Amino acid sequence: MGKKVALTGNEAAAHAMRQINPDVIAAFPITPSTPIPQGVAQFIADGKMDTEFVTVESEHSAMSACVGAAAAGGRVMTATSANGLALMWEILYIASGSRLPIVTAIAARALSGPLNIHGDHSDVMGIRDAGWIEIAAENSQETYDGLIQAIKIAENKDVMTPATVFFDGFDISHSIEIWEMEEDKKVKDFIGEYTPLYPLLNTKEPVTHGAWAPPDWYFEHRMNQLEGLLNAKEVVKQVGKEFGKEFGREYGLFEEYKMDDAEYVIVAMGSVCGTTKDAIDSLRAQGVKAGLLKVRLFRPFPYQEIAELLSNAKAVAVLDRVSPAGAQGGPLFTEVRSALYDVNNRPPVVDYTYGLGGRDTQPKHIKSVYEALMQIVNTGKVEKQFDCLNLRGTWG
Amino acid sequence: MSKKLDIRWHGRAGQGAVTAAKTLAELISQESGVYAQGFAIYGAEKRGAPVVAFTRVDEKPIRDHSAHMEPDIVLLLDPTLLGLVDVKEGLKKSGRVIVNAPFDKQQVVDELELQGYDVYVVDANKISMDALGRAIPNTPMIGALAKVTGLFSKDEIVKGVIELLEESGKFPQKIIDGNRQSIEKAYEEVK
């Protein structure tokens, strides 16, 4: 068991980085993730870690420096949010396409405009096709645990794919919570030493990184890359188990909360899952068979496992912390609904957008979702496939 | 006494309401088997703008990440917020209100229409001005809260806050001594 601490989500991420002590961190500050590089810089100044901290003039340069350092053979990390992540976008593809296991902590935040610095998933959903592993954390504990595991997942030789652990801006990044910090040495032992496959700095075996791939090879490279990303699913399970064995907190692809006999199920990611668990407990006390499927691994998306679990439900609501932006629903909804197409028992699935730009989502809003699901089951009719939680007025 | 406690802090940016909410969470959670959460609603980040911060305490891990709260205790850190913020919003019938104001209790009760609630008043600005030369009411209000709730003895709360201030490494001895004095005085004077 670790040491009980009262620290914010950002401090959890900074401490994970301190214990991981990567070779290089290149970062540029942006709200709400700024306290992560700030904390790291303090640890370095205090002699508590010896990472080479590269200060840069933009996030584009931060990710570029990460790519260079990772290609050179280093263990590399960074942190960002929102517009900063958007500015990294071009280089995110170069990191994944070059099979560089960079790990990024993301305090998830709305993208401007209008200017907003608060929690939402617009940034992490914007990079969902960049070929990165995406792991959602509910709270500070999962942020800390997730970053430690992400190093091992990304660096697995069958994976060799960059990974991000995201947690909600302000809701988690700036909230003090109680969580357990493990001993430095135990974390160090858990992640082990990193041996890069083809380090650029190994002059005895010169290699080329970032080579030109014309039409006769680019396709094969891309599919090779996809294989690495898909391999991450089994490795996430395996590392989650090992982590549980070592530290007592086991992780999988998702968390099932009161799912065994659940008739009405919410599928969600991030801090809203905690609020949802509280709502479920009070509904269960009234005899409502409510459950939560908390998605932890969003990329690669474990569609078969999720479809199988949801096929026992009577009705399902997906919560997306992002606008559908013209799609049938938010990204989590379209994934879940598509996954269910292959199973025989397909419950009705509806989508809610919630929490945009830091809008508060309270237990009563979650309860209203379960009430809507009960209504769907009672009437056999879906009145609204898409709706919003805690929006002024009504949608549609 | 049940360990479950919900606390809301109203202040103005710069007065340390957010720091107070988080400091209290940190202090309370030092006891084993007690969980706490400290957070704030971040607005435009302008000095002087009204801010709201929260501290949740429970015997089990706190999972709710919304700002929904039916507080047991509301603290008002700035007398100029009287009438501007809804102190009673969600406040439990048995709820207590601690106000930083230079007025007497009856005036505060009338102004905030707090008849029927337990109201406590302390002139934290004056205490802070005397001890630090600046009106930073957050630490004296933590002292007042300790007294009103009985969560900490005077020695415990002084020791706890001062340790955290020292650990942060940000403050000269003069500021630390001033804070010690403010906490003690507010603990003694709140009524």
Image: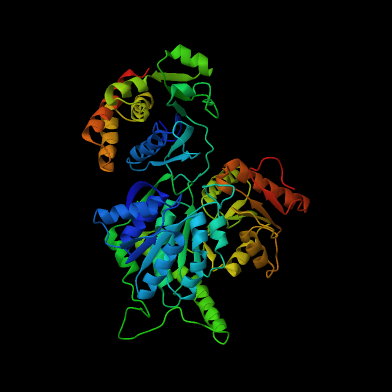
| In the image, residue B131 above or below residue A115 | above
Q: Nearer the viewer, residue B72 or B43?
A: B43
Residue at x-position 78% and y-position 53% = A381
| In the image, residue A96 above or below residue B82 | below
Task: Pinpoint residue B40: horizontal percent, then vertical percent.
Answer: 46, 39
Total number of numbered labels?
0
| Whether residue A366 is visible | yes
The quarter of the displayed image where residue B147 is located: top left
B105 sits left or right of A337 in the view: left
Task: Pinpoint residue A240: horizontal percent, then vertical percent.
Answer: 43, 65
| In the image, residue A382 above or below residue A150 | above
| In the image, residue A287 above or below residue A196 | above
Q: Nearer the viewer, residue A30 or B159?
A: A30
Q: Which image quadrant: the N terminus of chain A?
A: bottom left
Residue at x-position 42% and y-position 36% = B18
Residue at x-position 46% and y-position 19% = B118
| Whether residue A250 is visible | no
Task: Pinpoint residue A190: horizontal percent, then vertical percent.
Answer: 33, 66
Task: Pinpoint residue A268: horizontal percent, then vertical percent.
Answer: 58, 55
Q: Nearer the viewer, residue A249 or B168?
A: B168
